[in-house]
Amino acid sequence: MNSITKILLVAAVGVGGSLVAQMAQAQRSGEQAGAALYATHCAACHSGDRFGGLGPALLPESISKLRGPALATIIARGRPASQMPAFGSDLSSEEIEQIAVYLRTEPDEQPVWELEDIQATHSVLVDRKDLPKKPVFRGDPLNLFTVVEAGDHHVTILDGDRMEPIARFESRFALHGGAKYSPDGRFVYLASRDGWVTLYDLYSLQTVAEVRVGLNTRNVAVSGDGRYVMAGNMLPHSLVVLDAKDLRPLRVIPVTGDDGESSRVSAVYTAPPRASFIVALKDMPEVWEIPYSKPKKPVYPGFVHNYEAGMVEALGVQDQAFALRRIRLESHLDDFFFDQDYRHLIGASRDGQSGQVVNLNVGQKIADVALDGMPHLGSGITFDWQGRSVLATPHLKESKISVIDMTDWSTVKVLETQGPGFFMRSHENSPYAWADVFFGPNKDVVHIIDKKTLEIVKTLRPEPGKVAAHVEFDRSGRYALLSIWDDEGAVIVYDAKTLDEVKRLPMSKPVGKYNVYNKITYEEGTSH
Ligand code: DHE
């Protein structure tokens, strides 16, 4: 390199370097201006630390779904059907952008939310001994539906005999994951992305207790014996065990690998025959099994022996409950489906290219499954086909449904759909499986699949232009309830045999509905 080139290079790096420095400085001052504006205009409702208060948390994890200009638009225009006002006339668009930049900035220190923080949020609104012994309404309490309405953050309790709402209450902000029931079906547990868990009594139709388990939560699961609720968090990286009676926090389990690195929780599932919770992790190639008691009969030879052989690490507890079994994998697995006896777990690979079957008894991958296009296994269903148990799953990135033989994990059939789908549902008494098309130009259609021929026999378009998604059957399998995902949406009740519309109940973006009986009996056609 001659000296002239050297001088030019040094000058270029100098200019480039100062440009980078200038940009970083501009970013920092934008953030600082955003922080000051936040303190003046937002902190009163969302709290100074952005953990949330009257309004939801505004940490980067909390707003990750608001991509591009969506966040600034909400600040400018407010949120309909909420207390979030519009700031468009008080603040310039530059100031709104500065707030948005600040909200997307990680806090200087990693937020903490420990057992004491959780305990401080715990409130019991009604003492269990003051609850009535019988339902305060007429009708089958096991045929109720909990309907989550995301449009205005409410929950409707629907009588599945008359298909009439019997209660409606405001929920915490952005409930996510299925509603979970106590094994007797009397209580429902709801988790919000904001970390709140709510316990609601379906007999007296009132909220019994609440607690904030984290700053960003994925979902909850209820133990098969009804004693515990486990919540999985994205922020902080933890699992929280609650007393199912009143949500009293019992312990926090940090989600940490051998190397000391922590992981977000993808989801926590209950595995009643194993008397354990199964945990999917986002950032670690491991599946965790956490027993809450000894299973009634050993789930596999050597279960107890394996404990003794040190397969579990006690997390500072004397009993075997909540000890941890790590199942180490070759790659990350997200989004699980379990066979009916919880011996196998089918997980989707993070790259969306395949699926894997893990035998939970031996704690090893035993097969690969041909599942590309990001299968949404959590929404898969099982049913009997030609004497064999098959799994059917939609794909989030491809217009197809895969049907997999659960004895040898081969693909039985791939059905072409009118677009990628999110949810599938059936019922053992129904000849049909229902699958929505959630993305693309046909997001308003739902396919009806004959479970015998594995052919699409009908395609419904109940409300042209509006997303039609998420089906759930009533207890008997006679009716199928479908959502129109719109702020001015509805739950449509279909006759599950004739496929005729029976009734339309107006609702505010009813994202999910969960029938008590189908959930507590682990009906093969619904999510668990
Ligand atoms: Fe969900 C359940 C993961 C985005 C609505 N979702 C689940 C479950 C998981 C999951 C692991 C099963 C847990 C359970 O039910 O307890 N969801 C994810 C994601 O990783 C993803 C793609 C990204 C994210 O930001 O979390 C995601 N989910 C969404 C949405 O955008 C949806 C459509 C709207 C919303 O409300 O957030 C959505 N997810 C749902 C619903 C269920 C669910 C309605 C319960 C389905 C059921 O019938 O059981």
Image (cartoon, rainbow, N blue to C red):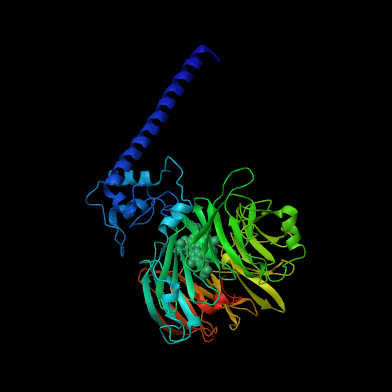
Which quadrant of the figure has residue 340? bottom right
Instruction: Point out residue 503 in the picture as x, y percentages from the top left corner.
Output: 41, 83
The foreground one among 155 and 99 is 155
Q: Name the outermost residue toward the top.
A: 3
| Residue 512 drawn at (x, y percent) | 47, 70
Up the image or down, 75 lies above or below 164; here it is above
* Residue at point 47%, 76% (across, down): 482
Residue 448 seen by the camera = no
**Whole-percent x, y for residue 222 in the image:** 55, 67
Q: Quadrant of the N terminus?
A: top right
Count of numbered circles in the view: 0
- Is any atom of residue 32 visible in this view? yes
The residue sitting at 41% across, 78% down in the picture is 204
Q: Residue furthest right?
A: 301
- Residue 205, percent from left and from top: 40, 77
126 shown above or below 320: below
> With 106 as the anchor, is 434 left or right in this view?
right
Q: Nearer the viewer, residue 244 or 380?
A: 244
Please report the residue visible at 53 percent of the width from the left and 85 percent of the height from the top: 478
Rendered-image quadrant of the C terminus: bottom right
- The image quarter containing residue 276 is bottom right
| Lateral position of residue 486 relative to residue 178, left or right | left
Which residue is at a point 52% across and 87% down the rendered structure image? 498
Residues 464 and 22: in front is 22
Q: Is residue 422 above or below residue 78?
A: below
Q: Give the left or right position of residue 468, taking residue 80 as reference.
A: right
> 302 and 29: which one is in front?
302
